[in-house]
Amino acid sequence: MKISPHLNLAELTRSETAKRNGIENTPTAEHLENFKLLADKVFEPIREHFKTPIFISSGYRSKALNAFIKGSASSQHCKGQAIDIDMDGGNGEVTNRMIFDFIKNKLDFDQLIWEFGTDFNPDWVHVSYVKTGNRKQKLKAVRAGGKTSYINIP
């Protein structure tokens, strides 16, 4: 099922963890509508700008899958409002930092997270979009003492 010209449902629901553990990971109609909006406002503009496939490392997570992986109880992935992008497996011409900077400077979004990595390139980029009231919140995820914390960034 196509969500947008360059994004299909299989990319958004793919989860080896769900598959291995027999966890259902099928979004509702409401979640699909949220993903269509996210695709229109965020994913497709990124795809068009960089003119290369954009790799999603995490999309939809059912509540059961999210609980299994110990994700945040308020994760926007469970609502069809968030994707994680990881260009490390791409052609090397587009980096996670380039994706992060493009979203930060050119697109509307609810939350944009520089996920771990270094000061030069995140390990992946988390981005979310909501129908109304996008916060334009920019964060950096860091690990300290085995715990993840989030730092506001300009």
Image: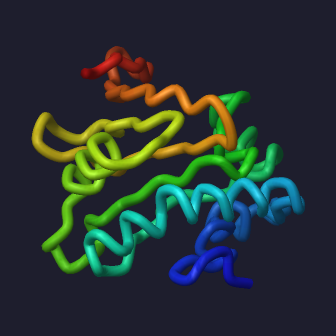
Please say which color scheme the image uses: rainbow
Q: Name the spot of residue 133 as percent of width and height, x first.
A: 63, 29
Q: Name the spot of residue 5 as percent of width and height, x first.
A: 56, 83
User: Residue 2 is drawn in which quadrant?
Assistant: bottom right
The tally of labels here is 0
Closer to the camera in the image, 87 or 102: 102
* Position above or below: 129 against 140: below
Residue displayed at 53% across by 35% down: 110
User: Residue 23 is drawn in which quadrant?
Assistant: bottom right
Closer to the camera in the image, 38 or 12: 38
* Position above or below: 8 against 147: below
Residue displayed at 48% across by 63% down: 43
The quarter of the rendered structure image containing the C terminus is: top left
Q: Name the spot of residue 53 as percent of width and height, x first.
A: 37, 79
* Horizontal side of residue 8 vs 22, given as left or right: left
Residue displayed at 40% across by 20% down: 150
The quarter of the rendered structure image containing the N terminus is: bottom right
User: Residue 108 is drawn in which quadrant?
Assistant: top left
Q: Name the spot of residue 134 as percent of width and height, x first.
A: 56, 32
Closer to the camera in the image, 142 or 52: 52
> Furthest residue to the right?
29
* Horizontal side of residue 115 vs 50, given as left or right: right
